[in-house]
Image (cartoon, rainbow, N blue to C red):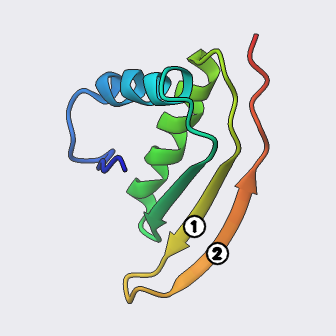
Amino acid sequence: MVIACPKLDQGKEIYIRKLVSLIDDAKVNTINIVIMEVPCCGGLLSMVQTALSLARNNVPVKVSVISTRGEVLSEKWIPMVQNV
């Protein structure tokens, strides 16, 4: 599990490097991103997409959006990134 706040945390590149390591070295088979409905949480998806573009491996990504009351508002799979 990785916990991050794209609005308040410093050093987003550290998170990206750790995500790349999880993808390539730990060989995770799926990434599940759980974000709140507030706009700033969307930065987590951006960090994961950046990490996937830098990683050697590719894994499916699922994004779940949770309301401020704890209700699941949406769940969707993100198309896989084609590494160059």
Where is residue 5 drawn, in percent x and y?
Answer: 29, 50
Q: Secondary structure at mark 2?
A: strand
Identified at 41% across, 85% down, the residue is 70
The residue drawn where x is 70% and y is 29% is 58
* Mark sitting on residue 41: none
The residue that appears at 31% across and 50% down in the rendered structure is 3
Residue 31 appears left or right of 17: right
Residue 69: x, y in percent?
38, 89
Q: Quadrant of residue 18?
A: top left
Residue at image coords 56%, 37% = 28
The residue beneath circle 1 is: 64
Q: Residues within 10 Å of mark 1 (few under 14, many from 20)?
A: some
Locate the C terminus by quadrant. top right
Residue 12 image-quadrant placement: top left
SS of the residue at dot 1? strand
Q: Which mark is residue 74?
A: 2
Numbered disc total: 2
Crowding at mark 2 (Cα within 10 Å: few <14, some 14-19, many 20+): few
The reply to whether callout 2 and callout 1 are in contact (CB within 8 Å) is yes
7 or 31, nearer to the observer = 31
Q: Amino acid at mark 1?
A: Ser
Compared to 42, does 21 lie above or below? above
Residue found at the very far top of the displayed protein: 84
The amino acid marked with disc number 2 is Ser
CA separation in Å, label 2 and label 1:
6 Å
67 to the left or right of 61 = left
Q: Earlier in the sequence, mark 2 or mark 1?
A: 1
- Spot occupied by residue 13 in the image (x, y as percentages of width and height): 34, 22
